[in-house]
Image (cartoon, rainbow, N blue to C red):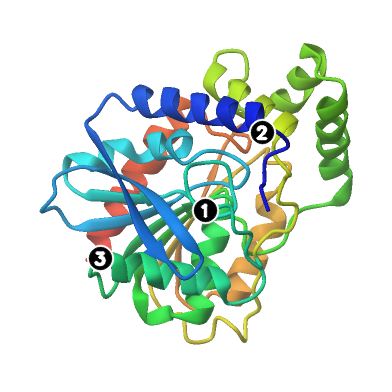
Amino acid sequence: MTIYRSEEGKRELEHWYDIAVDHLEISVDETHIETRYGSTHVLLAGPADGPPIFVFHGGNATNPMTLAWYIDLADEYRLIAPDTVGHPGKSAETRLDPEGDEYGKWVVDVLDAFDVDAAPMIGTSYGAGIIVRTGAYAPDRIECAALVVPAGFGTGPIRPLLKVGLQSVLYRFVPRDRILDYVTSALVTEAESDRLARSTIGASLRYVELEREMPDSTAAELADFTAPVALHLSEADPFFPPEVIVPRARERLPSLSNVETLPGERHILSPSAREAVTSSIRAFLDDVQC
């Protein structure tokens, strides 16, 4: 079963995917690996002999769009970024259960494909939730984790979500610029200048059968997940507001060591916030010797 509403829509998402790869402005290798849930397409950047970091992207968006946030780490690390199965990209279109062990099993397969026993991980939005689910299923495979605008701990109040959600659904049937402008202004910190994010969001809303369930976890499920964790949240994120997410994360993550809130930022970070988060993650990796 396809996640796309049409072949035209699939081609449109692949078009913006390839543009996002070009925007990385760094040499990027691409490969496919096999997992129990089908073929997984992977982007690789940085020195081949550098210490690996696995990078998981946001849901209903493309891998290179958020890989760009951390690309400066490729001066030192080997960034290994898989396209999440069942989401826009070039992996199998198999949809996984976001609240069970399937994502954890998929991540284990990805690590095994690269002969990595355990590694640092970075997750953005839905990708953070994937890491959290991996922490519940295979905590020993995660050396440390940086979770950015993170899923995995529920969502915020319903009213802001409804405002964005209703306009997103409307855009599917009435694809007018003013509706997309409303959605992107709520989600993207610098909506007027981030044309790639706008185009990718628009294509996803129009052409993808969106994944609406988020990965989640409980304190009991995460009791054995003791790797150091850094949390980066955006002050004006309608999905994962800090005042809601931080208390839940503190309750569920026994080894949460760093919490940072980005003033004025929305769900999709500005270039300056991306640089700040990347610098903070680099320092975190050094501090915890991960």
Relative to 246, 173 lies left or right: right
Q: Residue furthest left?
A: 49
Please report contact status of discs 2 and 1: CB closer than 8 Å, yes or no: no
Relative to 220, 147 lies left or right: left
Q: Nearer the viewer, mark 2 or mark 1?
A: 1
Badge 2 element: helix
Instruction: Give the amino acid at mark 3.
Output: Cys
Query: Label 2: how many residues lie within 10 Å, few (<14), some (14-19) or many (20+)?
Result: many
Tag 3 residue: 290
Instruction: Give the amino acid at mark 1.
Output: Ala
Q: CA distance from mark 3 to mark 1?
A: 31 Å
Q: Earlier in the sequence, mark 3 or mark 1?
A: 1
Tag 2 residue: 204
Badge 1 element: loop
Image quadrant in which the C terminus is located: bottom left
Q: Quadrant of residue 53?
A: bottom left
Tag 1 residue: 92
Q: Nearer the viewer, residue 25 or 240?
A: 25
Query: Label 3: how many residues lie within 10 Å, few (<14), some (14-19) or many (20+)?
Result: some
Residue found at x 87% / y 36%: 163
Residue found at x 42% / y 55%: 40
Q: Earlier in the sequence, mark 2 or mark 1?
A: 1
Residue 194 in sight here: no
